[in-house]
Image (tube, rainbow, N blue to C red):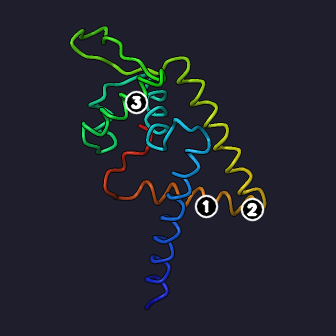
Amino acid sequence: MSAAESAVETIQREMTIFARRARASAGRMHPELSLVSYTLLGHLEERDGCRATDLAAHYALDKSTVSRQVSALERAGLIERRLDPEDHRVQVLHLTEAGREILAQVTRSRRAAFRERLADWPEEDLVRFAAYLERYNAGPGETGSDRPA
């Protein structure tokens, strides 16, 4: 096995561990907020609301998957539906005040966890790691949907 092949295997393994850790930590940050829920709330905040079909398209998810997530977030009082002022046939999802508060709380907790985990890294390593992640996520992939527009 070449050094490049070995490196790709290591990257795949480590990214899987990273994803598992992210899913697990989301539940610890707020018991009602899964990683998917956190991501959807973040998207709604960035866009100042959007339709459920837009969420499904952006994240390349089935409409039924998004519908279940949206229903759970509505039941928890974190999002609400409002009529689109330009087209009253369309409902737009928006964060409630409770949704904004929980999203801010979880975001602060996640940032603190990252800062703690990376506290001993030299600044140049942090800058390099950030650049590598941006480069990786900007490359061709399945959806590229996690990138802010």
Q: Quadrant of residue 30?
A: top right
Is label 2 in contact with label 1 (beta carbons under 8 Å)?
yes
| Quarter of the figure that contains the C terminus | top left
Q: Residues within 10 Å of mark 1 (few under 14, many from 20)?
A: few
Q: Compared to 36, does 75 lie above or below? A: above
Expressed as whole percent of the image width and height from the top left, the position of residue 75 reads 42, 23
Residue ID at (32%, 36%)? 66
Q: Residue at x 63, y 44 (%)?
A: 110
Q: What amino acid type is highlighted by mark number 3?
A: Ala
- Give, as a three-letter code, the residue at label 1: Phe
Which residue is more in the foreground, 51 or 73?
Answer: 73
| Residue position marked by numbered label 3 in the rendering | 72
- The quadrant the N terminus occupies is bottom left
What whole-number distance in Å separates the C-alpha atoms at marks 2 and 1?
Answer: 10 Å
Tell which of 47 and 81 is nearer to you: 81
- Secondary structure at badge 3 equals helix
Q: Mark 3, residues whose alpha carbon is within 10 Å: few (<14), some, or many (≥20)?
A: some
What residue is shown with label 2?
A: 121
Q: Which residue is mark 1?
A: 129
> Residue 9's spot in the image, x, y percent?
45, 77
Contact between labelled residues 3 and 1, with CB atoms less than 8 Å apart? no
Q: Are marks 3 and 2 in contact (CB under 8 Å)?
A: no
Look at the numbered disc 2 and give the secondary structure of its residue: loop
**Which residue reaches farthest left?**
89
